[in-house]
Image (cartoon, rainbow, N blue to C red):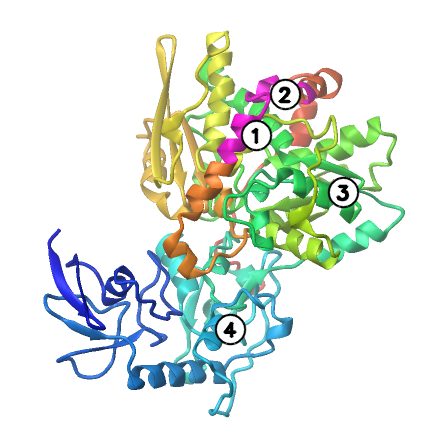
């Protein structure tokens, strides 16, 4: 790559010739305001906030899309630039619902922050505003276009990264809106509820369906026995909502906070993850040894992936594991095993799941996720919603002492913890499957080739005279080639892990939203993943099949993995789903 010499505000620097002016400015230590720009996802020059002046070039230019060239002279701080940025921002604000104090993104809004930075005190432009209705029919996502600034970052995330194409710009000119086709709700379209549009949105135009009132109501109901479980990814990110550094492990503080909120039992979804490995791993072994099902087996832990499979790949459902995801397994065990043991009426048992994923809200509502009329999970909230509850309760989270999950239902292994990162399900599964096949404990249980943020990762394990091969798909947008190989009967793999969000659950749609500028400077995945693997390293037990609670559970209740009762409570079926449901009455 050749370098070019560029002068920016009198400072001469050398940068690669494929840089944009915005990248060059960052290299020079000069901050340029942006709204529509999102590193590696969206650069379209639509918001006109990143304007700069270039000698010899007519008019101001959007630096996020303008390429550098040898000898260019750039100005970033002139009167014309400052006024143009202010005018553009005021025009955006003029058609924006500015009820900031009641907005879900208050104090974490890039538009609000930029208005403060550019010293916007009044909006000169007053006129008609778009007032579209709020779309809140989805169990996972709310769309409020009165807050939308037409930056199209959500479209870029959905179309360019996830390759789902559920969101698009409709109409033209002043009537332009971001939504789905034919004025439908996102609930009636091919949205997979992954929430990456929420993570991309700089304002409050897209956010999760907030369920915390349901949780408060349950906690206040003396007739309910309310239990809570937390996914492994939550403890690696919750602290960010309280100003702690990205990647800070807050497991103990989180448990203390949940107990202070009033939950009767605080349990760990990692325990459900260990149970998932026993069920899914046994299913995998059965397919390998006894040829009871098709290979490759495809994981079913990610509800956004499963909705994609039902919509786009219904012919591959026979490859998918029938195991429910960990929080549903845990919910079923809490209600049908623990409740009986503790003398609790299972109809009064109420389970709350805290998840890094908004698709879990959709998954929880699926009609098949129940047994004998008793739902596996009653309410699902996100990491962000749990933070809202902690703040609302006046709990000083940062200074909380550490507590442990309630025993024995909180017993979990490090294998359950790594479910939160891409490759973690496969690594946890292989820690168990390989030892079951060789018949003895294996010393090295860390599969480094499964770790990291590569979008496609291949791995293998030698078991006697057989080599088991697998592949990790990190991000639903990277699914096509490998799944088409399966369709054609040409797959070389025995095991496929798919997570809809690149990086896995730690980068889920329900995790704390990180400002776009911070995302440029910090590898958020790397920080959170490091916390996940630290959780594994510090665990006393690191193999799912060594979890004492899970072993007792099989001994006292389930019998063995994939038993009849295990299938009733811990497994499910998936079926073909229309991408665009018809409302024509046919």
> Between tags 4 and 2, which lies in front?
4
Q: Which residue is mark 4?
A: 112
The circle on residue 259 is 3
Which mark is first along the chain, 2 or 1?
A: 1
Q: Is residue 230 above or below residue 292?
A: below
Q: Residue at x 43, y 16 (%)?
A: 444
- Circle 2: element type: loop
Mark 1–mark 2 Cα distance, whole angstroms, equals 10 Å
Q: Read off the residue under disc 2.
A: 547
Task: Name the residue carrying label 1.
Answer: 416
Asked if the residues shown at circle 4 and circle 1 are in contact, with their CB atoms under 8 angstroms apart, the answer is no
Contact, mark 4 vs mark 2 (Cβ under 8 Å): no
Quadrant (top left/top right/bottom left/bottom right) for the C terminus: bottom right
Region in magenta: 532-549
Q: Residue at x 30, y 66 (%)?
A: 30
| Pick the front one: 283 or 449 | 449
Rounded to the nearest angstrom, the CA distance separating label 1 from label 3 is 22 Å
Residue 548 magenta: yes
Give yes or no for contact between labels 4 and 3 (Cβ–Cβ under 8 Å): no
Residue found 48% across the figure and 32% down from its top: 424
Residue 385 vs residue 16, the one in the foreground: 16
For the residue carrying disc 4, how many other residues have a C-alpha within 10 Å: few (<14), some (14-19), or many (20+)? some
Mark closest to the chain's N terminus, 1 or 3: 3
Left or right: residue 232 compared with residue 350: left
Could you say which quadrant of the image residue 322 lies in?
top right
Disc 1 + disc 2, Cβ < 8 Å: yes
């Amino acid at each position: 790559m050749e370098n070019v010499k560029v002068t920016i505000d009198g400072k001469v620097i050398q940068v690669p010739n494929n840089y944009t002016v915005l990248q060059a400015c960052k290299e020079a230590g000069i901050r340029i305001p942006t709204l529509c720009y999102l590193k590696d996802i969206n650069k379209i020059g639509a918001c006109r906030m990143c304007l700069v002046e270039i000698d010899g070039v007519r008019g101001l230019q959007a630096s996020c899309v303008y390429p550098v060239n040898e000898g260019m002279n750039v100005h970033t701080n002139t009167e014309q630039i400052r006024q143009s940025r202010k005018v553009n921002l005021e025009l955006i604000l003029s058609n924006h619902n500015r009820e900031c104090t009641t907005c879900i993104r208050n104090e974490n809004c890039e538009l609000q922050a930029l208005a403060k930075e550019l010293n916007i005190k009044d909006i000169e432009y007053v006129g008609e505003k778009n007032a579209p209705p709020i779309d809140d029919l989805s169990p996972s996502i709310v769309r409020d276009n009165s807050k939308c600034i037409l930056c199209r970052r959500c479209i870029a995330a959905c179309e360019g990264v996830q390759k789902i194409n559920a969101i698009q710009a409709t109409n033209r000119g002043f009537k332009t809106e971001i939504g789905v086709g034919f004025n439908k709700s996102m609930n009636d379209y091919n949205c997979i509820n992954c929430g990456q549009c929420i993570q991309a949105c700089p304002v409050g135009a897209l956010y999760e369906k907030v369920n915390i009132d349901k949780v408060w109501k349950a906690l206040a109901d003396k007739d309910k026995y309310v239990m809570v479980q937390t996914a492994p990814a939550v403890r690696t990110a919750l602290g960010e909502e309280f100003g702690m550094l990205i990647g800070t492990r807050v497991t103990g503080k989180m448990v203390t906070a949940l107990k202070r909120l009033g939950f009767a039992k605080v349990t760990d979804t990692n325990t459900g993850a260990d149970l998932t490995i026993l069920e899914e791993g046994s299913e995998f072994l059965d397919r390998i040894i006894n040829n009871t099902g098709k290979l490759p087996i495809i994981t079913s832990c990610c509800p956004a992936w499963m909705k994609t499979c039902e919509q786009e790949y219904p012919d591959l459902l026979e490859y998918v594991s029938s195991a429910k995801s960990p929080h549903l397994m845990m919910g079923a065990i809490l209600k049908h095993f623990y409740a009986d043991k503790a003398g609790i009426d299972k109809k009064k048992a109420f389970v709350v799941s805290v998840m890094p994923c908004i698709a879990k809200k959709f998954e929880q509502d699926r009609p098949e996720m129940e047994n004998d009329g008793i739902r596996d999970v009653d309410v699902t909230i996100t990491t962000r919603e749990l933070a809202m509850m902690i703040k609302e309760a006046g709990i000083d989270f940062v200074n909380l002492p550490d507590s442990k999950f309630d025993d024995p239902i909180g017993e979990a292994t490090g294998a359950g913890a790594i479910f939160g990162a891409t490759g973690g399900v496969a690594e946890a599964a292989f820690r168990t499957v390989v030892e079951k096949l060789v018949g003895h404990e294996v010393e090295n249980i860390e599969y480094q080739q499964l770790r990291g943020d590569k979008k496609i990762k291949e791995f293998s394990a030698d078991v006697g005279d057989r080599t088991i091969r697998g592949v990790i798909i990190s991000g639903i947008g990277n699914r096509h080639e490998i799944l088409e190989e399966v369709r054609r009967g040409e797959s070389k793999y025995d095991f496929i892990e798919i997570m809809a969000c690149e990086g896995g659950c730690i980068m889920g749609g329900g995790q704390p939203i990180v400002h776009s500028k911070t995302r440029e400077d910090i590898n958020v995945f790397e920080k959170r993943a490091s916390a996940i693997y630290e959780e594994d390293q510090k665990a006393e037990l690191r193999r799912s099949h060594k979890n004492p609670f899970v072993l007792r559970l099989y001994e006292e209740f389930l019998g063995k993995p994939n038993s009849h009762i295990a299938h009733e409570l811990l497994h499910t079926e998936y079926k073909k789903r229309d991408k665009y449901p018809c409302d024509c009455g046919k």
